[in-house]
Image: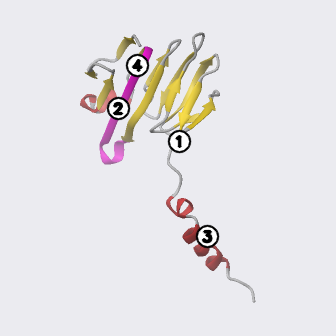
Amino acid sequence: MKMKPYLCILILCLLFPALSQGAESPVGSIKTLEGDVLVLRGGQSIPASIGMPVFQGDIIQTPASGSAGIIFRDDSIISLGPESKLSIMEYVFEPKDEKFSMLMKMIKGTFVYISGAIGKLSPDSIKLETPSSIIAVRGTKMLIEVKG
């Protein structure tokens, strides 16, 4: 007895819910890289590479002699200096629905932020957290250093 194609697809979707929901969309990608930068994702440590997508929940970690540049979907840019650690806690860029949010936690190191579309369309939606403060971004560029 031959199984109909749509029945096979239905069975796969029931067995693998992630297939029916679709994968989470990347919030940006690695644009520049120096040294052995790591992306901590879902309990795993993944070596970063240029063009690699980054997701909400990722932690980017640079070594003592490394750096990384990340460009987000709204064209915001974040540059991390040596011995830095950044957590991408929340990122929403849905201009059609007027939904915007960027929440990053700078755990340690140096961090340069250049705003993109979220900064222009909804500057109140950007928050950069450090271990001792939360910074609401109102400008287009900033440099933060967190001593760890």
x then y, percent, for residue 74: 42, 33
Q: Nearer the viewer, mark 2 or mark 1?
A: 1
Mark 1 Cα shell of 10 Å, populated few (<14), some (14-19), many (≥20)? few
Q: Which residue is mark 3?
A: 12
> Disc 1 marks which amino acid?
Gly
Residue assigned mark 1: 42
Determine whether 12 is above or below 94 in the image: below
Q: Quick one: 101 or 65, which is closer to the camera? A: 65
Sequence-wise first label, 4 or 1: 1
Q: Quadrant of residue 31?
A: top right
Q: Amino acid at mark 3?
A: Leu
Secondary structure under badge 4? strand
Q: Position of residue 92 (x, y in %)?
A: 37, 40
Mark nearer the N terminus (2 vs 1): 1
Residue 95 x/y as whole percent: 35, 42
Per the model, the C-alpha gap separating discs 2 and 1 is 18 Å
Give the CA separation, mark 3 to mark 2.
Answer: 36 Å
